[in-house]
Image (tube, grey):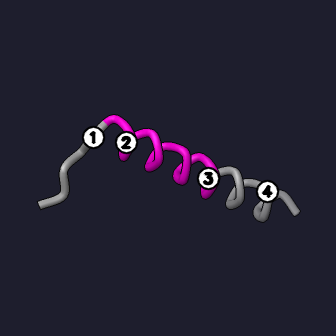
Amino acid sequence: MYIYTPTNIFCYVGVTKEALSFLILSSLT
């Protein structure tokens, strides 16, 4: 099972924010 530790959550949030910002930038151009 995958254990959700604070570090894993922060990494997931960071990756999600980067992915969302990339999608927004690519959609604006």
Residue 9 got which mark? 2
Dot 4 or dot 1: first in sequence order is: 1
Labels 3 & 1 near each other (Cβ < 8 A) = no
Residue under numbered circle 3: 20
Query: Is residue 15 magenta-colored?
Result: yes
Q: Is residue 17 magenta?
A: yes
Choose the circle earlier in sequence order: 2 or 4.
Answer: 2
Point out the frontmost of discs 3 and 1: 1
Residue contact between numbered discs 4 and 1, judged by CB atoms under 8 Å: no
SS class of the residue under badge 4? helix
Question: Sequence order check: which comes first, mark 3 or mark 1?
Answer: 1
Q: Nearer the viewer, mark 4 or mark 1?
A: 1
State which quadrant residue 28 falls in.
bottom right
Residue stretch in magenta: 6-19
Mark 4 Cα within 10 Å, few/some/many (few <14, many 20+)? few
> Type of residue at label 4?
Leu
Mark number, residue 25: 4
Three-letter amino acid code at the position of disc 3: Leu
Name which residue type carries label 1: Thr
Q: Secondary structure at mark 1?
A: loop
Quarter of the picture containing the C terminus is bottom right
Q: Is residue 6 left or right of residue 4?
A: right
- Closer to the chain start, of discs 3 and 4, is 3
Residue 1, x across and y down, in percent: 11, 61
Q: Earlier in the sequence, mark 2 or mark 3?
A: 2
Q: CA distance from mark 2 to mark 4?
A: 24 Å
Mark 1 → mark 2, Cα distance in angstroms: 6 Å
Q: Quadrant of residue 27?
A: bottom right
> Can you identify the residue that label 1 sits on?
5
